[in-house]
């Protein structure tokens, strides 16, 4: 299911995700789970929200954040 959702969001012509991802990121920001500045996105709280769509993106951000910390 997860892979199917991601493939549905991908715009095959441009290779970019549709606006849905922007909406999810905005919602995560409003819930104080992520924050941003001009250059970066920061994970504030990786606890599940109870919403499968939000939690999917939140887990991906957490995985990338943890990988980045390990590389430093």
Image (cartoon, grey):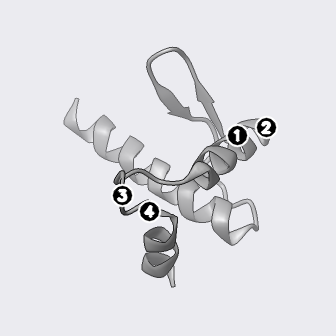
Mark 2 sits on what residue?
30
Q: Are marks 3 and 2 in contact (CB under 8 Å)?
A: no
Badge 3, how many Cα within 10 Å: few under 14, some, many 20+?
A: few
Q: Residue at the front extreme?
A: 13
* 3D distance between C-alphas at marks 2 and 4: 24 Å
Q: Looking at the picture, tell me which residue is in the foreground, 38 or 18.
A: 18
The secondary element bearing badge 4 is classed as loop
Disc number lying in front (2 or 4): 4
Horizontally, residue 16 falls left or right of residue 52, namely left
Q: Earlier in the sequence, mark 2 or mark 4?
A: 4
**Could you say which disc has been placed on residue 26 in the image?**
1
Mark 3 sits on what residue?
13
**Residue at 66% from the left image edge and 55% from the top image edge:** 47
Q: Are marks 1 and 3 in contact (CB under 8 Å)?
A: no
**Could you say which disc has been placed on residue 16 in the image?**
none
Q: Quarter holding the C terminus?
A: top left
Q: Earlier in the sequence, mark 1 or mark 3?
A: 3
Disc number lying in front (1 or 4): 4
**Could you say which disc has been placed on residue 10 in the image?**
4
**Residue at 54% from the left image edge and 54% from the top image edge:** 18
* 3D distance between C-alphas at marks 2 and 1: 6 Å
Q: Are marks 2 and 1 in contact (CB under 8 Å)?
A: yes
């Amino acid at each position: 299911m997860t892979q199917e959702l991601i493939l549905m969001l991908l715009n095959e012509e441009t290779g970019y995700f549709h606006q849905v991802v922007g909406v999810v990121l905005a919602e995560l920001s409003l819930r104080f789970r992520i924050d941003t500045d001009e250059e970066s996105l920061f994970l504030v709280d990786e606890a599940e929200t109870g919403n499968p769509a939000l939690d999917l993106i939140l887990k991906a951000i957490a995985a990338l954040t943890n990988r980045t910390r390990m590389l430093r």
